[in-house]
């Protein structure tokens, strides 16, 4: 019979497999993943799961029975080592050769490692999977202080979660400001203020150069005059896409596995979805690689429609979120390349506002903090490819709907 193999038991795999079945696919579906767990939600790893409010069962995308009911075979704790495109097989590390008609790569991304001496010491952690977080939680119970290397979303969420558990938390960021890669300076200022109000200490322009064992804990040596001691160190400096498997098989690679609007790679029988893809976004008219759950699930759906013969091309607005302390940040669109930012609400002393990003007077993205209406409005405006009137949006007294440009 026909068979589809999905590599990586991820967000995208959970969606692709179930959507394939829902869309009428009747052949075999097998998901092969190297983690020993069913696909789970990764975002809580640095949030509710780290701070202890959620267990592994709480974060599973679907329970085991729903895959069984949909006749989706989950082969977990097994790594795929090679793809042979000529005879359409994959080779697993436990020595099996499996045949596919269509192959789906949802291999995601792995953490970027910090290239300094001591990054592999005990009590130095990275954060990508449940195993990482279980180890961090275990250590945090006995620790009184933590140093986070990297002031991006994951570093800052981790800082917030550990701070809530009572640890003394310090964040060091190599760039001149936290969140530099993803937001405007005014947003960095806001997050720096809130972290400081919550008791997290942030140092920017500080580059870690070595991690050493010192006294009972660790010491991080830096480019600045100051070095930092802590019981544990967590490194969050970004991810790299897992393209090697596809690359070795001769599939075309850009800044990720290159896919078309149907998530097909340069081999029409091989698809890819999620963090690993380098794909064209029609709204922004450029290639992007996104690290977000909505993108992984959207692309999973697109693959299923294409294989099931009712193709719907990828046409989604990127969106994200981040939770830190009582701040619920929702982001619609991509702010990269902005030349102006307009604020609605009180960013300077409050904790609820929205930052609207513009490029050449065109609205391109919104960061909404505890402002779900602004997020929904921004998302709708961008999806419909409408523009906003800058002067009106900056005036809180004017109703959002009246801010759409003529
Ligand atoms: P992944 O989740 O990366 O999973 C890929 C899987 O494939 C992994 O299990 C990997 O081990 C496996 N694999 C790789 N190679 C092989 C192989 N050869 N054989 C077998 N298995 C293999 N996104 C948001 O939108 N909002 C958030 O708030 C948010 N917070 C996050 C917080 C943290 C701590 C992290 C780590 C991520 C967060 N993200 C968030 C990003 C989000 O989790 C990712 O975008 C999402 O997980 C991408 O899913 P994916 O399907 O691409 O694959």
Image (cartoon, helix red, strand yellow):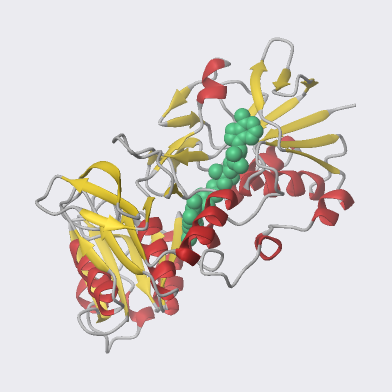
Is 49 placed above or below 152 here? below
Where is residue 304, by image quadrant?
A: top right
Q: Compare residues 244 and 202 and report the one nearer the observer.
A: 202
In the figure, residue 119 lies in which quadrant?
A: top left
* Residue 200 found in image quarter: bottom left
Seen at 77% across and 24% down, the residue is 101
131 w.r.t. 93: above or below? below
Residue at image point 57% right, 56% down: 134
> Can residue 263 be seen in this snapshot?
no
Q: Where is residue 319 in the image (x, y as percent from the top left)?
A: 45, 58
**In the displayed image of the protein, which residue is found farthest to the left?**
225
Residue 59 appears at what percent x and percent y? Answer: 65, 62
Residue 387 shown left or right of residue 110 in the figure: left
- In the image, taking residue 145 as reference, residue 282 lies left or right, namely right
Quadrant location of the N terminus? top right
- Residue 244: x percent and y percent? 51, 24
Q: The C terminus is located in which quarter?
A: bottom left
At 17% from the left edge and 51% from the top edge, which residue is drawn? 206
Q: Nearest the camera: 267 or 151?
A: 151
Residue situated in front as seen by the camera: 299 or 182: 182
Q: Which residue lies furthest to the top in this view?
A: 86
- Residue 166, visible in the rendered structure: yes
Instruction: Find the residue positioned furthest to the bottom.
Output: 397
Q: Residue drawn 38% across and 70% down? A: 167
For the image, the number of numbered tags is 0
């Amino acid at each position: 019979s026909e068979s589809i193999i999905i590599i990586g038991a991820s967000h995208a795999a959970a969606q692709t497999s179930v959507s394939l079945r829902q869309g009428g696919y009747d052949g075999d579906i097998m998901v092969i993943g190297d983690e020993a767990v069913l696909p789970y939600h990764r975002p809580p790893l640095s949030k509710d799961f780290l701070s202890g409010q959620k267990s592994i069962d709480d974060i599973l995308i679907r329970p085991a029975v729903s895959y069984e009911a949909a006749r989706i075979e989950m082969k977990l704790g097994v790594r795929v080592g090679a793809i042979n495109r000529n005879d359409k097989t994959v080779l697993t590390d436990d020595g099996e050769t499996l045949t596919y008609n269509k192959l789906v790569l949802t291999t995601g991304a792995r953490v970027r490692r910090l290239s300094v001496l001591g990054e592999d010491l005990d009590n130095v952690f990275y954060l990508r999977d449940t195993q990482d977080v279980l180890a961090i939680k275990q250590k945090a119970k006995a620790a009184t202080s933590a140093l986070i290397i990297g002031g991006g979303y994951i570093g800052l969420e981790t800082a917030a979660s550990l701070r809530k558990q009572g640890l003394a938390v310090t964040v060091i960021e190599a760039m001149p400001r936290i969140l530099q890669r993803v937001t405007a300076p005014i947003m960095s200022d806001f997050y720096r203020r809130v972290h400081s109000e919550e008791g997290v200490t942030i140092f920017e322009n500080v580059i870690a150069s070595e991690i050493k064992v010192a006294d009972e804990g660790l010491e991080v040596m830096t480019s600045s005059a100051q070095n930092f001691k802590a019981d544990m160190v967590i490194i969050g400096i970004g991810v790299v896409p897992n393209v090697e498997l596809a690359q070795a098989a001769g599939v075309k690679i850009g800044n990720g596995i290159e896919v078309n609007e149907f998530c097909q790679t340069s081999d029409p029988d091989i698809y890819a979805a999620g963090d690993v893809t380098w794909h064209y976004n029609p709204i922004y008219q450029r290639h992007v690689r996104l690290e977000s759950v909505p993108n992984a699930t959207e692309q999973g759906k697109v693959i299923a429609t294409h294989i099931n013969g009712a193709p719907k091309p990828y046409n989604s607005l990127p969106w994200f979120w981040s939770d830190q302390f009582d701040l619920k940040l929702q982001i619609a669109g991509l702010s990269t390349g902005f030349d102006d930012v307009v604020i609605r609400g009180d960013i300077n002393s409050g904790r609820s506002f929205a930052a609207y990003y513009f490029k050449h007077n065109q609205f391109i993205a919104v960061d909404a903090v505890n402002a779900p209406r602004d997020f929904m409005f921004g998302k709708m405006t961008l999806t419909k490819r409408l523009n906003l009137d800058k002067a009106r949006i900056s005036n809180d007294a004017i109703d959002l709907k009246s801010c759409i440009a003529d």
